Image (cartoon, grey):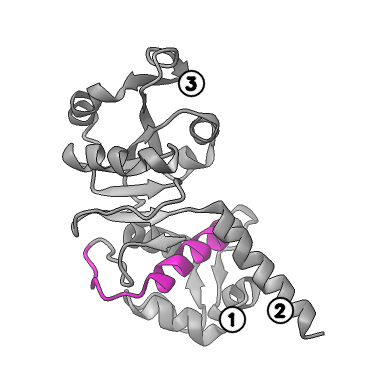
Amino acid sequence: MDESNEKSSTPGRDAGVPKAVVNRLSLYLRELEHLLRGGQQTTSSHQLGRVLGFTDAQVRKDLAYFGHFGHPGIGYRCDELVAAIRRILGTDQPWTVAIVGVGNLGRALLGYRGFSERGFRIVAAFDTDASKVGSQIEGVEVFHVDRLAEVARAHRLRLGVIAVPAAAAQHAADQLVAHGIEGILNFAPVTLSLPDHVRRVGVDLAIELEQLTFAVANRLGGE
């Protein structure tokens, strides 16, 4: 997973927070939500770290970037920490999202329920294929990319997802940026050139598998 800057900015916080810390916040959030679903009301840095493979010192250090959340003799109240992390990540508010490209990957993303569960609502999809324009996929209307400006204004879009072939990705990104998109999730296997004010995250599944094979190969090599 690639990020446009080595530092990651969070709402109302110091832009100098390392992106690795922000990545771990998402892991803490999911584990805390799991604990709440199981009826557990409190936890500790030791428990969070043990489950996720971090030290308790690392958990405390990560959270200390954003304030103090523990209670003496109690640890962390799960519901309080969930609410705090959601505020930090910006997911305590709904986000409208557009997808450019409704091929196999785009269709799969439109059908992924995890987005809506995390507060991300895909409100529009775009393509240039006349056979797809005007259709609905998973309840989301597919527009021609020529209507991006109109739809972006209507839905006040700030986030976009690129699911087009590599050769078309930069053009898709340029169109999104031109119409006010501030953050792009890029699934195309290419590095995008974007203005400094636009944040990007790249997801290249082949690279993720390479990271996995590196970990497995080196583990086996050391045995």
Q: Are marks 3 and 2 in contact (CB under 8 Å)?
A: no
Q: Are marks 3 and 1 in contact (CB under 8 Å)?
A: no
Mark 3 or mark 1: whose residue is earlier in sequence: 1
Mark 2 or mark 1: whose residue is earlier in sequence: 1
Q: Residue 53: percent from the left, percent from the top? A: 62, 76
The mark lying in front, picked from 3 and 2, is: 2
Q: Residue 33: percent from the left, percent from the top? A: 54, 56
Q: Is residue 57 above or below residue 107?
A: below
Q: Amino acid at mark 2?
A: Asn
Q: Amino acid at mark 3?
A: Ile
Query: Quarter of the image holding residue 196?
Result: bottom left
Q: CA distance from mark 3 to mark 1?
A: 44 Å
Q: Is residue 200 within the magenta segment?
A: no
Q: Which residues are magenta?
A: 12-33
Locate the C terminus by quadrant. bottom right
Name the residue carrying label 3: 137
Secondary structure beneath dot 3 equals: strand
Q: Is residue 138 above or below residue 202?
A: above
Q: Nearer the viewer, residue 197 or 145?
A: 145
Name the residue carrying label 2: 218
Q: Residue at x 54, y 36 (%)?
A: 112
Q: Residue furthest front?
A: 167
Main SS class of the magenta portion in the image: helix
Q: Amino acid at mark 1?
A: His
- Left or right for 205, reference 151: right
Mark 3 or mark 2: whose residue is earlier in sequence: 3
Q: Residue furthest right?
A: 223
Badge 3, how many Cα within 10 Å: few under 14, some, many 20+? some
The mark lying in front, picked from 3 and 1, is: 3
Name the residue carrying label 1: 46
Q: Nearer the viewer, residue 20 or 39?
A: 20
